[in-house]
Structure formats: structure tokens, C-alpha cells
Image: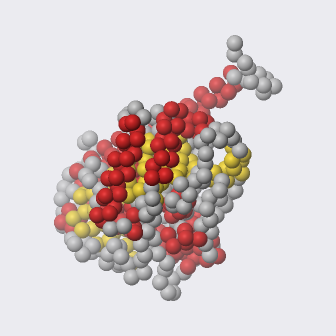
Amino acid sequence: MSWLKKGTGGSVTGRVVGSCGCQSVPASTREGSWGRPGGGWGDPPGGCSPSCFGSRRVAAGFPGSTQTPLSGHLICTPLSPPGLGSACKRVSARRVLDFSDPFSTEVKPRILLMGLRRSGKSSIQKVVFHKMSPNETLFLESTNKICREDVSNSSFVNFQIWDFPGQIDFFDPTFDYEMIFRGTGALIFVIDSQDDYMEALARLHLTVTRAYKVNTDINFEVFIHKVDGLSDDHKIETQRDIHQRANDDLADAGLEKIHLSFYLTSIYDHSIFEAFSKVVQKLIPQLPTLENLLNIFISNSGIEKAFLFDVVSKIYIATDSTPVDMQTYELCCDMIDVVIDISCIYGLKEDGAGTPYDKESTAIIKLNNTTVLYLKEVTKFLALVCFVREESFERKGLIDYNFHCFRKAIHEVFEVRMKVVKSRKVQNRLQKKKGATPNGTPRVLL
């Protein structure tokens, strides 16, 4: 595409700039003096306002509690996560980000979390979408109901996640597995790598075969979880063994067409966020368009790597075609935490009004390896995080111009999707009117 300019450049002094223009200089976001694994930059140092730093942990927002019977089981949406102190509750999620979503009435794809008891399903959900500290998940009670939660952080990250208790019996007549699997986009099966996983593999095979008979379009994802307690060699050996056994079971059943994706995950590092990113990307029909836009942007701007992040969950919904390095992804996640935390302190007015993350939000962090991290707001839900060499960052104006073109293209993608959703809603209304009599009784077509 010809709307981007090309160029290269030199160096720049690093800083983090809040939406109000304040500056801070963290030399590296890899491990701050108050960092912790899996928790970004963790709790604030002494003297910082806990209400501001607590906002990041409630940024995902929590819908009201709802309970609906479903085939003998209970679907519940949690009101709020346990363990959040009063200081963290002072800042409403809507003050950090505006969660009005034009696609809230759209039929959302489902992501099912399944696995044996105590495999870590609820902990994964709380850490990724509720910003719960990994250490706090030790006090979670075992799930005994089907818990459903709507995730509507942005127009791209828009789905339902269902957390199933480990004791679900597919042969129970009260369990309508056909209805559940029919609307499922991805099925995540969690296996505890530190436990004997033979029973888990048997349950995985039963779950996959039942789901595939109902819906052949489901993406089957296997999280080999709790690998933080294993050595590197043991991780590789465990993944190889589970991969071989699971695929052998499918081959014996004549189901070689089923493709299983395997991920090594832990809530104590960013591996769980990266795995969820790859799962969510498979549910985004606009992914090829987003990747193409990112490829054009970095090739014309002298950028090494670029991610399009959902700010709330720190899931990256798209990246360019170059390979993703785990350390690079961790730095991007930590940078988002820094921007949100500092903006909550300095980006609000004296009376607390305003939105910390807005179209003026930007951040520049200079690392000690001649690399510059550059963050720019794309939409009120999304951020572009780039890795740029110092010599390429000298002509920052060129990058900003190309970014302006990139952001305009992203908004055009939003507009196209909005038109599609509106047309679907109109069609659904027409179908409902045709299928019902004036008194509301469904017609029986003979």
C-alpha cells in the first residue's frame, strides 16, 4: 500500500509519558525493584496511591451476578473477584477505560475451560481476565458449578468464557452437551503437568470426540499447566509424551482429522497470557487483515517488532509475521502495566475526573540494549507496542505519520465489522418475526 512513507533514523532519550505529560524513567521493565512473576509490576512501592495502582487490577470490570439454570447445572457470573481490598475498589473500571461496546448484543463465540478437578482452570481465568495475583489463586475454592463470564474488552476481544467443574459427566442425562458444543469456538482442556495425567488424557479424548461429533469447527487447545515446577528438560519430555498419547488415542478412534494444539503454561509467568492470545486470535475473522496492516507498518517504519494489544487483558490480538520471542512479549506486558499505573496517578484531574488511557496516551522506554519500546493508543481498548532500534527511532515523525495511517485503517476495519453486525441483527429480527404468530406462539412449519 502506498500510503506509508519509508525512512530510517537515530536515537532518543527514553521516558514514560502519561496522558497528562508527566515523565518517569524506568530503565528496564524486565524486572522492576517491586516486580513479581506473572503480576506485571505488582504492588506499588511505599508512598504511591494504592487507589491508582489498584485500578489496573479491576480494569477488566465485573458484570453483575446472574444465575440461570442450564440442563440441571448452574451458570453463574461472578460479581467481583475475591481478595481485592477496599483500596483497589476505589477506582471504577469505567474510569480507567470506557467499556461501552457497540457489539455487546452480538452473538459471541464461546471458549470452554475444561479439565479435571484442581487442574487450574479457575486460576487461569482469574489471573488473565480479573488481574488476580497468582498467589491469591491458592485460596480459590473448587468450582462446583458451570460459571459463565462475558469478556467484551474490545470489538476484537469479544467472547464468552465458560468454566466447567472437573466432575462433569457427559453421560449424565441432565447435561445437554450438544447445545453447549454447538456454539463453541474453542475448547481449552487443562492438564496438570505435575500430576498423573493418564486420567486427564482419557477425559480429554472423551471430551474431544463428543465435541467433534456436534461441531467440527471447534478449535481444540490443550494447556499443559503448572509447568513452573518442572525443569526445562522435564517440560519438553512431558509435552512430547502428552502430545503423542493424545494423538495416538485419536488415531486409534479413526479421528486423525482432529487437530490438537498444545501449550506449556503457568500463571506465574506470561506463558498463560501468550497461550490465551493464540487461542483468541483463532476466533478473530479479521486476523489476516490486522497482520497485513502490521507487516506494512513495520516494513515502512524501520520497526523490529509490533504487537496490537488489548490493554485490559494484555492479550495480543495480532502481531507481524516475524516470530514472537517470550522475553519480548513480557516486556510489552510490563510496559502496558507501567503506562496504566502512571496514568492513573498523573493522568487524572485533581477531582479524579477524566480517563487515564485516551487518544493522547503514549510511552517511550529506552532499554539498555539500544532498543526503544514505543507505545501508542490505537482505540480506547487497543494499544500498539513496538520495538525500535535507536538509530531507526531518530526519525520519530516518520513513525508517527505511518502510525496515523495505521490507526485510520484499524478504525475502518471497525466500521466494516459494525456494518456486518448491524445487518446480522436486522436479519435475526426478520427471522424471528417470520417464525412467530402475532400472539408470540411459534409457528409449526409442515
Place residue 360 in its image quadrant.
bottom left
| Residue 248: image location, x then y, percent | 36, 41
With 302 as the anchor, is 28 left or right in this view?
Answer: right
Q: Residue at x 68, y 21 (%)?
A: 434
Q: Residue at x 59, y 35 (%)?
A: 178
**Residue at the extreme right of the image, as rendered:** 439
Residue 428 sits above or below residue 243 on the image: above
Place residue 13 in its image quadrant.
bottom left
| Residue 328: image location, x then y, percent | 30, 63
302 or 208, which lies in front?
208
238 or 12, which lies in front?
238
| Residue 236: image location, x then y, percent | 30, 58
Q: Residue at x 64, y 25 (%)?
A: 431
Q: Residue at x 42, y 60 (%)?
A: 193
With 242 as the anchor, is 215 left or right in this view?
Answer: right
The image quadrant where one finds the N terminus is: top left
95 or 438, which lies in front?
438
369 or 235, which lies in front?
235
Tell me, yes or no, if residue 107 can be seen here: no
Tell me, yes or no, if residue 368 can be seen here: yes
